[in-house]
Structures are given as C-alpha cells and as structure tokens.
Image (spheres, coloured by chain):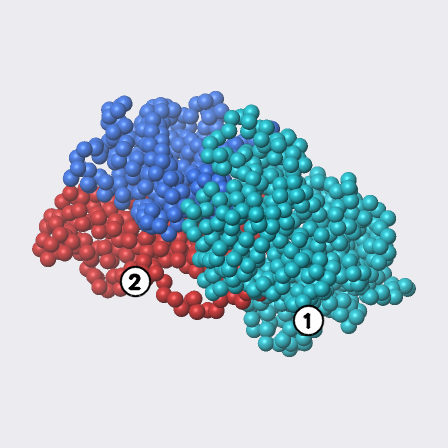
Amino acid sequence: MIGVEITGLTVTGPAGTMVQPFDAEIPLGTTLALIGESGSGKTLSAKSLIGLLPRGFKAEGAATVADTPLPVGRDDASWRGVRGRQVALLLQDPFTSLSPVHRCGDQIAWTMEAARGHRMLRRERREAVAARLAEVKLPEHVAEAHPHQLSGGMRQRVAIAAALAADPQLLIADEPTTALDASNQAEILDLLRAIQAERRLSVMLISHDLGLVRGRTDTVLVMQSGVIVERGETSRVLSDPQHPYTRALIDADPVVAARRGSGEAAAVDLDGRPTLTSAQGIVKTFGHRTVLHEVDLSVREGEIVGVVGESGSGKTTLARCIAGLEKEDGGTIDFAGETLAPGRASRTPDQMQIVFQDPYSSLNPMMSIRAILAEALAVAGRGADEVPAMLELVGLPAEIASRRPAELSGGQRQRIAIARALAPRPRLLICDESVSALDVSVQAQILELLSGLREQLGIALLFISHDLAVVRMIADTVVVMRDGRVVEQGDCAQVLTEPAHDYTRLLVAASTRENAPAGAGKD
Amino acid sequence: MLAARVLGTLAVLLVLSIVIFAMMYMAPGDLVKNLLGNRASNPDTIAAIRAQYHLDEPVVTQYLLWLKGLLTGDLGESIRLQVPVTEAIGARVGITAAMCAIAFAMSVVVAVPLGVISAVRAGGWTDRIGNALSVLGLSAPTFAVGLLLLYVFAYYLPILPVYGGGDGGLDTLRHLILPGITLALGLGAILVKLTRTAMLRELEADYVTFARARGLSERTVRNLALRGAAIPVVTGASLVLTFLVGGTVLAETTFSLPGLGTLLEDSVLFKDIAVVQALTLLVAVVIAVIALLADLAYLLLDPRLRDRIGVDS
Amino acid sequence: MTAVAPTRARSRRLPPASVLVSLAVLALALLAVVLGRFLFPDAMHQDILSSTLAPGEDGHLLGTDELGRDVLAMSVAGAASALVGPIIIAVGSMVLGVILGTLAGYERGWLDSVIGRWTDLLLALPVLLAAIVVGGVLGGGYWVTVGLLILLFSPSDIRIVRAGVMEQSARPYIEAAQMLSLSRWRVMFRHILPNVASLVITNMMLNVAFALVAFSSLSFLGVGVAAGTADWGRQLTDNRAIMFDNPAAVFVPAALIVVVAVAVNLVGDWIGQRLSQVGEEA
C-alpha cells in the first residue's frame, strides 16, 4: 500500500489556472511538505483534496488514499463520508477554527459521531473524548473548557484531536503553526510527528517556512505561482537546491541563514556613541493588568536595537510608549538629553517615526501614494517635489506615486510606509514587527533596505520582533522581554550564541526551529 | 454591572419625565377648556378644576407632586377619562400586549427560518423571494399595509373582523389577527435581513470550514452556524421589538382598536399630562427591559462574555 | 499578496435591472417634485357640489376625493410634500451624525460620554412614539415635524458613524498620521471621514426610505402635514372614509409611497454593495 497518490491535480479559478497539474506521493507514515509564498497556490491545492475550494474554483485530477479514489472536483454530496474519515484538514488559526460557543469535548465528539452516524452515550462519549485528548497530551478536563479559556497552543492541540477523531489516513495541515508563538510552534509540529508515527498517517504539511520543514518532513514540493518548481527529499532540497527560486527562498530565510552561521548583522563599532533615547523604569498598566514592570532600554545614535519576545511580552507596548502612542504610568523617557512627557503632545515628528506590522492597513486606502508622502514631507517643511527622491530612497520607481495603496503589493506598501516615516527626517525609526507579515523573500529585501538606510542616513533603529532569527540579521544589540520584564540584554551575537537565561535559550532554539528543549515551554 | 445598568436607566427615565412634563406644560392649548368642551364655564367651576389638578401651583411643584405620587404608586388621574391612570391603562394594556405578542411571534416564526434558508442557499429562489419580501416589508408603511388588509378583508374576503377589539377572549384574538399581520410584515422584513446577514457571516467562518473538513453533516454544520449567529439575531429581535412598540399606534388607529396607542394619541391631543407621562415612561421601561433581557441572553449564548464578567458557566 | 487590484472596468458594468427600474422610478418621482405644481396648478381645486367619483367617472382617471378633487392631480402634486421632507430629514440627520459621531468616536473621553448619554435619551422612546408625543404637543406642522425627525433619526446615525470612526481610528494609518503630529481636524476630516463615507452614504440612502415611511405615518396620524394638503400620507388619512367609494383615492398614494420607498431601498443597497467592494479592493 502506497498511502496517498495524487495524479494530475489542477485547480482553476475565475482568473484562470491557479495550480498547474502535478503528481505527488505520500507513503504511509511520511510527511510531504508543500512550500510556497502567499498566492503560490499551495492552499488551493490542499483544499481541492478535501473538496472545500472556495466558490468559483474547480479542481481536476485524481487522488487515492489507500487505493480508494477521492472524489476530486465532484460535488459536496460525493465528499460525504470521505471528509474526516479518509482525509482531514487542519487550519492555520486555532483562534478561529473552533466554534467559540461550544465546549472542546463536544467539538471532538462531533467528528466521531459524524463518522458513526449516531450520537454516543454519555459515558462512552466522555471516555472517547478523554482518549483523544490524551493523544494530544491534554488533560481530560479540557473537554469541559471553551476554546477562549485555552492558550493558542492548547487550542491547536484540541483542533488536532478533533481533526483526527474519525481516524483519517491523510491529514492536510495548512500552516498549522503560523499563528502560534515560537515556543509553541516546535511543540505542535513535534506532536504531529509523534502522532503520525504512531498511527502511520500520511501528512501533507503546507508551509511558507523552510526552516520549519527541516527534520520534520520527508519530501518537499516547492510551488511558485501554481507550478511545482522543485521536488525531492527534504534534506537534499535544503542542502542542494536546484531551482533558482528554491535557492532564493533558502537564502532569504533567516532561519536557514542562522543555521548556516551566516546572516548576522555586520558588527558596527558603537563604543562612545552618545545615547539617543533611553527609557527608565517604564511601568504601564491596562486596567488591572500590568504589561510593563519597570523596563529599562536605551538606544545609541545610529544603533540598531532589537527587542524580542512572544505575544504578551510587552515589547510593542514599550515601543508605543517611546513613540508617545501610549502614555506610560511610571518611569521616564529621555530623547537627546531631554525628558519627554507621556503622549504625543510632547513629541515632534523629527524625533521618531514608526513602521507598523500590517502593510495593508498602515496606508490610507483613499489617498494616492503621492498625497501620502507629500503630507509627511510637508510636516518637515519639505515640498512635494521631493516625492520622487523619497521613492528612490526606498527603492521604488517614481511612477508609483500616482497609484493608490490597493494597487501595490505588500512589500511595496511597506516600502512606502518606510518612506513616509523617513520624510520628517527622524533620528529614531521604530519598526514594530515591520517584516512579520511579509513573505520571506520580501522580508529579506526590507531588512536589507533598513540596514542600508542606517548606513546611509545614520538613523537609529528600534526593531521589535517575535522572531529572533530576523533580529539576528539586523540588530547590534538585543533585548529579550518576557511578561513585561527584560530578562536579558546585550550584544546581539553574544546573547544569541551564549544565552544566559533559560527563556532566551528557548527562543534561540525556536528561532532555528529545533525541537523544543524539554520543560522549557509554557502554555 | 446590573446595578449600574438599572441606575442608568432610572436616570434616563427621570430626565425623560422632566422633559415631557415641561413640554406638556409649555404646549399651547388649555386643559380646562378641553375638559369643559362646549359646556358653559363659570369661574367657580374653573377654579375648582384648577385646584383639583394643582394647575395653579408653580410647574416645579406640579412636577414634584406627580413624582411623589409616582413613588407612592399613584400615577394620578386621567383628566380626560376621569378615572385613575392605572385604570385607564389597565383597561387597554391587554389588547396592545396581545397584538404585539401575535406580531412578534408571527414575524419570528417566519422570518428567522426564511433568513437562514436565504443564507444557506444564497442566490437561490428562496433568497430572492426573501429579499423581495424584506425590501417590500421595509418600504411599506404599517398603515398602508393595514388599509390594504382592511379593504380586502372587509370587501372581498369577509372572514376576519376589521374593526374594533371584539368582546373578549377568542373573539378579541380574532380581531387581533389582521393588526398582528400588519405589524409582523415590517418586523419580519428587518429580521429576515438581520438573520441572513448574520448567518452568511457565520457560514464563512473558519470553524464552519473546519467542521465540514471533519465530515460533520450539513445539518449539523448549519445548526452550528445558527448557534453562532444567535447573538446578532437576538440583538436584532430586541431592536425589532422597539420598532414594534412604535408601530402599535398605527395598527390600532387603522383597525380602530382600543389599545394603548390610541390612548396615547388621544391623551396627547387633550394635554392629559398624567396619562402621557405614564405611557411614555411605561414604553421607556419596556424598551429598557427588552435591552436588559437581550444582554442576559448574550450571557447565556456567549461563554466568552460569561468569563469576562465572572459568572460561573 | 502580489495581486494587483482589478481595474476600473467593473465600474462601467451596468447595474442590475431592478436597480435600473428603481433609478427610473426615482427620476420620475423627482420630476413630479419639481414639476408637479406646474403640471397641475389647480390640483387643489375643490368641487364640493360633485360627490366622490370612482375612477374613470367624469373624465377623472383616478376619480375624485370627498371634496371633489382629482386624485391623479393630487397624487402628482403631493410628491413634493411627501418627498422633500424625508430627503431633508435624511440629509440633516446625516450631517448631525457625521459631526457628532466623528467627534465622539475620535476624541472619546467626556465628549463621547456626553454625546452617548444624549443618544441614550433620544433612543429611550421609539421614533414614532416620540414624534407623536412631541409633535402632538407642539401642535405639529410640516417643518416642525421635519426638524423633530432629524433630531430623532440622528442618534442611530451618530452611533453608526461613531462605530465606523472608532474602527478606523484603531488602524495603523491613523496612528501614522498621529506620528506626523497632524492636527486632529486634519486626521478626522482628511483621513478618517473619506474612509467612512461609504458607510455614511449607504446609511443616508436607507434613511431616505425610512424617513419617507415615518413621515407619511405621522401625516396619517394627523401630526405633520396639515389637513387638506396635497401629500401622499395626508391623502390616506383624509380619504379613509371614502375608501369603499373610491379605493384609488387611498391606494394610489399608498402605492406611490411603497414604490418610491422600494426604489430608494434597492438603489441604497446597490450603492452600499458597490462602495463596500471598493473598500475591499482598497
């Protein structure tokens, strides 16, 4: 028995062919990785294998699971009895994939009851649910919880238990860890790997993250604009990529770079530089919750300081206090020797600017690029005639000025956001997860642009990220935050090679996508 | 939380009562003249009437007297009807309440399933019909629908009574069917739209996709989505009830029903302050209670909310 | 993510037939508003000697009312009174909604609380009941009723605009504007307002239909338009008594109200859909 065989699978949409025909095999007990950037067609391929393509899309081709053909391209009714029992799909975001108003145990039980065609007796049901929860290493009482009472990692475990509850032979996991914190990502993938070995499952792992794939998958398909450009054993593809696109992806990936030992920011001599801004004893509370406990941080002129931490660590709040978008409840923030009162009123645009995470909502959709940049230039008394120069500075052609944000790609928008931030000639640029929403290849370009700007303009950067691998590529010094406190800080290379704190060690391991150190994770 | 809510509502009611009292006081028209009608008036009668209703006191005193009465459970006396306000309202509240209940029940029973089917088969013929009906229901004034029904049932199809409130029990119920339908059309139109929108949004949600991906039957999936859509639908239903309270006047006028709506209309024209005050406050209380019930329903429906305010689930 | 937004070809596509018909209906209605008076200068001409005539009798296509007035002429002439008020109500309430809603949603703080309590108070009674009470007390009248309805329609507009403004305010492009230390007026009216415009316009269209229904309801109840005026809602009340002699006297103005309201609703829905598509593309 071969497991899963896919022949000539293709997807067409309203705009034409989205996925060119391709073949693949996933033997029992192995994992196939389907790698590609957003819009490559990887998710459409996955959804066509479970009959859940969006309206207007159509699949053709054939696929078999344990020699039983799947009704690829057929109507909903043909898929009845196949979904859940032969093929299951795990979605990206555990925060939305479970019904918020039902208990976790019920959601797992439904899968089983759908397969059996009848409701289970209460006791039988409880025991079955407990067994499924045990498989994903969750205690029995989770069955009584609602999803919002669990952490992201736990929710994804519940989702895995629910997906596998009718014992399918093929599990399609669509970016199953992208929405999770670094320390949870490895755990979930390792759990999937363990369950797979136990059950002899075929797994199709959809991901944009090459680093995540190493050591956890057997074969890789690399997809670019709907075409498979490279395939082969995972270790071979990663060490010896044949197609230029694969090579570019690997080069751009901060994790792979980190593993190779390259990808560290070139050392810049910062000794003796004056302090540009410093925050001392910053305290911030939201209601009863204290998100910053007396945090200290300083940035020297021309320095790139990376702030790393998981969601909820307070890193973004700290950056927003420095920018004046939040008002700190205690502590002082100095800028160029002057103490700034909390809030924007005490600050001027030529002190600091921010580049935000989401390139789609950080530009006003109703304004042209020219209007956006001209407005920012006017703030510093500069004329609209400098718009082309600003565009050139961020590596964009001048013609783009007449367009609206909707007509630009994510990377282009982020460049515009950087140009807007630079227009008032700030001395500090705050980047709040500014590359997190971008594809790796675009991410690498933006990082390059930012470090180039530092050299060209002598600007200082405060670079906030959840991803140590990214910070490693750009920062001189790094500050590690957890639960509103700084747990470690110092020279970037040193902190990352010889982490002193357990938590930093955990983040470093996660950043190279290695298996999580036992007991270090928290849920 | 509840206490703050009740206090807020009381504050609104207090302000509302002051505003209405002041307006009625300043409005043109003389109560005494209204009361005496065409009868000959002599100064003694007028003085007696003015004294009886404290009309010679300063307006603030009049208001405070009314407020004091309210707090002791005395809503005053209807000048127009010459009976206590509670009695005037009590005699008519049954008809209005029954009519509202009929209309609400009819609209929910028809509109919610229609909205659900419209969303599930979006673009299908049920959806088209549902959409056409809801646009029509939103566009047709209650009284126009009422007059049409009245005309048809009086002229061509004399199987249902079109006039008055009947003489109690089943007969009254029969008299309330047409007014009920009249009101239900507008309500149903809003409810269909709300249900369809809420249901469509839920059907697009990730958890519905995930449910399908696990092989759950389409019926189970639909129930899941409906459960998720329950909160916006309850919100809609509570808003619709408010709308209903306003529409009763029109239905009652059209079908000549002796309900609260017609009572209010007549009392306003007569400057019968005590009745107008009592009725507006009654309506405001009913609306506040509906909003409160909707909030309690959210607690029942949404476990996230339960945790946020610390109620044990 | 690299997808380039569709070109503007879509905007040249014709709207669906129902919307085209609705647009034609609205054009006719507006024509009646503007020209009604000139087409039927003697619409109000009474002929008390003649009794109510059924449609077709004595050269009256739709018959006459109790006072011997031609129903067709009255209905055309009544468009102005029936439609101008609702349009002004919708526009006025939109203006109030935009100003107060934007201030409340962007400034927050005490201003938001004050505006919030104000809308709470206005929403404590259903629009129609409040209009009956206040209108009845003030003695009614066309412009009093229009002003009253503007006031009573505004709280829901304020809330809608406020919610839209709050949603936009939380977006990074607004924070980027704050980082440039732009004035609050510039942020509110140059950045936020264009982004809630689609919401505002859609809502205003739906409010025209709603105001048409509410306004005619008030006329029906005797608040608003004075007795004997050429006005659709008023015709219904005045002619109820002769409904069985000349049904046209009641059902023609009623049908006109319904048809115009349907047309406004359909066009409003269509505009809303179009604008939200533009928003998604953006």
Q: Residue A437's spot in the image, x, y percent?
A: 64, 58
Q: Is residue B310 above or below residue C262?
A: above
Q: What chain is tagged by disc 1?
A: A
Q: Nearer the viewer, mark 1 or mark 2?
A: 1
Q: Is residue A520 left or right of residue B106?
A: right
The hue used for chain B is: blue
Residue B98, quarter of the rendered image? top left
Q: Residue at x 63, y 35 (%)?
A: A133
Amino acid at circle 2: Ala
Q: Which residue is more in the foreground, A207 or A521? A: A207
The residue wearing badge 1 is A394
Query: From this viewpoint, is residue A182 visible?
Result: yes
Q: Label 1: few (<14), some or many (≥20) within 10 Å?
A: many
Question: How many other residues sit within 10 Å of disc 2, few (<14), some (14-19) or many (≥20)?
Answer: few
- At x 20%, y 57%, the residue is C73
**Colour of chain C as rendered:** red
